[in-house]
Image (tube, coloured by chain):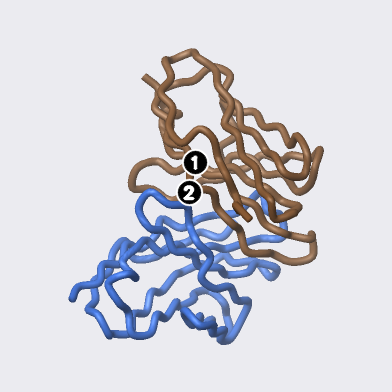
Chain colours: A brown, B blue
Amino acid sequence: NAGVTQTPKFQVLKTGQSMTLQCAQDMNHNSMYWYRQDPGMGLRLIYYSASEGTTDKGEVPNGYNVSRLNKREFSLRLESAAPSQTSVYFCASSPRDGESYNEQFFGPGTRLTVL
Amino acid sequence: LAKITQPISMDSYEGQEVNITCSHNNIATNDYITWYQQFPSQGPRFIIQGYKTKVTNEVASLFIPADRKSSTLSLPRVSLSDTAVYYCLVVPWSASKIIFGSGTRLSIRP
């Protein structure tokens, strides 16, 4: 049982390049999340997916797109990377059944640098 | 959305009890209060969650007064391994509006 896995662990991009961050969970959770964490700061929610085929914007969605490919996988895409998107990106999942809040389980993070 | 305020940093010593208070004046009726712990280069880890009064688990206790405008995370007999950042989280009904506080950097000394 690997929990939440993220790939890649590290990535360096040039301004304007695109890339997709991958996230997968093997806990059969309904909900998945993408956060970013800037140095010395708390986490900010980018996008959220309550179930397969549904996504919703979080606090800082601009410059990002997401795809809930199936129940296990939730990807985050940067279409045209900017230096302001340099951050650590965390994926998380929770069993959330829509009736109450559940504990979130986080992946190890992806460190992204945009030059 | 509830505005969250917690101390930027705290210091303590091994074996002491540590209490970290979080202020959330605009908390809504359906909001839950949750605390996470984060070590360097790792994702946050759930510690405890509550709605009102007191909640206790094997790691910590969470005290929430009747007006729910604040909450206190209590860590009994801390050790060096409790050195981490602790986040207070107010979770509304809609998960897309999850708010992390700025975090409290707790340093435990021998």
x, y percent for residue B67? 57, 80
Q: Residue at x 28, y 64 (%)?
A: B9
Label 2: few (<14), some or many (≥20) within 10 Å? many
Kind of residue indicated by mark 2: Leu
Give B106 or B30, whichever is nearer the viewer: B106
Mark found first going from the N terminus, 2 or 1: 1
Q: Are the residues at dot 2 and dot 1 in contact (C-beta closer than 8 Å)?
A: yes
x, y percent for residue B28? 65, 66
Q: Residue at x 26, y 67 (%)?
A: B107
Seen as rendered, the residue at the extreme top is A16
- Say if A92 sits above or below A97 in the image: above
Kind of residue indicated by mark 1: Arg
Secondary structure beneath disc 2? strand
- Say if B64 sits above or below B81 in the image: below
Q: Residue at x 62, y 64 (%)?
A: A103
Which part of the image, by quadrant, shows the C terminus of chain B? bottom left
Quote the CA–CA distance across marks 2 and 1. Answer: 6 Å
Q: Report which residue position mark 1 lands on.
A: A36
Label 1: few (<14), some or many (≥20) within 10 Å? many
x, y percent for residue A53? 81, 38
- Residue B31: assigned label: none
Asked where in the image residue A98 lies, by quadrant, the reply is bottom right
Q: Report which residue position mark 2 lands on.
A: A43
Give A13 or B51, whichever is nearer the viewer: A13
Chain containing mark 1: A
